[in-house]
Amino acid sequence: MGRDGFVARHGLWTAEQDDQGREIVARARAEGLDVVRFAWADVHGVLRGKSMMIDGFEQALHNGCALTTTLLAKDTSHRTAFPVWQEGGGFDLSQMEGAGDMLMVADPATFRILPWAPGTGWVLCDVYFPDGTPVEFSTRRILASVLDRLSAAGYDYLSGLEVEFHILSLDDPKLAAEHATQPATAPEVGIIHHGFQYLTETRLDEIDPLMEILRRQITALGLPLRSFELEFGPSQVELTFHPRVGLGTADDMVLLRAAVRQICRRHGYHASFMCRPNLPNMFSSGWHLHQSLDEHRSSTNAFMPAGEGEVLSATGRQFVAGILEHAAASCVFTTPTINGYKRYRPFTLAPDRVAWGVDNKGTMLRAIGGPDDRGTRIENRVGEPAANPYLYIASQIVTGLEGIDKGLEAPPPTSDPYGGSGDRLPGSLMDALTALDGDALYRQAFGDRFIDYLLTIKRSEIARFLSEVTDWEQREYFSMF
């Protein structure tokens, strides 16, 4: 079957993946699985897909699994932002006309068994058109391509996750028919612990029964969990992960968000990776991305300095300079929601301007390490936990690599992150989109078609936001005028 399937005809797997494909079929049978979920991360980093009964699993593995192309056209409300019924489907691509199909093709290296869903396997996919052409809007493929360019330059990318989010009691899921709007009415929730006792063991122990469930199932899933912590705000927690090379961190992040939300829901909780929920006393959540480069030639950390008193090598400073140079445009990738920009506030352990510092948690980029410290790295503190991890990571590599290629020099590190001379970060998603629209590097690296596609999706969200009458407007104007 495999030799005649869609994957084999178009040469979509390596020899190693062929072997892995045979292994996971055998494993699925040996484990007595009933169903396997085929999952694909869309432009928002949200997993979509289908569940295949086990008797159709092998066929779907080799022939792909059909998925409508309109999923490429959806904004965060699931509204279609492109005229898919017109010629070219709004994308100037014949494959996008008329809501036709594309095919999910599994990466067998990502196969897992879900510990919270009995008899259920899971595999991450990429998408292709029926003629075997890769879909150029696939963000996982964009990151893979960027990693290939980095490898050609002589480096591997090492990154680790530090993710904050909220876990809340699910008091009312709002499942009455009138709540099935687009998007649906948000659930009513309650907190599971009070805040303002950052890292206190007593508060953490209050929620340990739930955290025990999460940590056991996350580690059983194969995710490299390093620590779990109580954050400053009510019902806010943080997970950190051991570093991974290449695609691994991004794959882990999309699976982590889905896993946490699904596990919590099955136990009567609501987990949210929204940056700043509109709930009393809530604090913003961030996603801090730790990153470094391993140099092929020397097999060492390319950011580790040689000189005493230095925190980064010349290569590391050049990488920093490239990220800072394109910081405004990069915010579309690190902070892709309207809500995320409400986190950019001074004196909050979140950045509000373009700057870097040495072990300074108020700066956008925090440099950690020094001579003989193989853990020397850069921590980008600008991201929100709702970001698409493939685009977040790709944006770092593209800009950092340009800094190395051009020999850019970073400005001196700041010790005054909220009063220094750095440019302000974009004040809104609208400002960030304007910066991205005019950024030649991203258009060259990701392609004009992808950048214009992403701009269209995000502008659709902004247009809907601007058309809504908000509580703020009601309070501000209804009595005044």
Image (cartoon, rainbow, N blue to C red):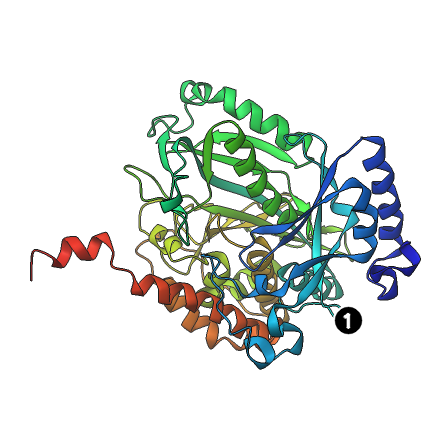
Say which of 232 and 433 sits in front.
Answer: 433
Residue beneath the point at 80% across and 46% down: 56
Residue 8 seen in the figure: yes
The quarter of the picture where residue 227 lies is top right
The quarter of the picture where residue 295 lies is bottom right
Residue beneath the point at 65% across and 32% down: 117
Residue type marked 1:
Asp
Say which of 239 and 80 sits in front.
Answer: 80
**Residue 328's spot in the image, x, y percent?**
43, 66
Residue beneath the point at 7% across and 62% down: 481
User: In the rendered image, which residue does mark 1 sit on?
Assistant: 131
Say which of 241 and 408 sits in front.
Answer: 241
Residue 233 seen in the figure: no
**Residue 170's spot in the image, x, y percent?**
41, 31
Within 10 Å of disc 1 (Cα), the crowding (few <14, some 14-19, many 20+) is few
Residue beneath the point at 48% across and 67% down: 457
**Residue 106's spot in the image, x, y percent?**
75, 52
**Residue 202's spot in the image, x, y percent?**
41, 18
Element assignment for label 1? loop
Is 304 placed above or below 173 here? Answer: below
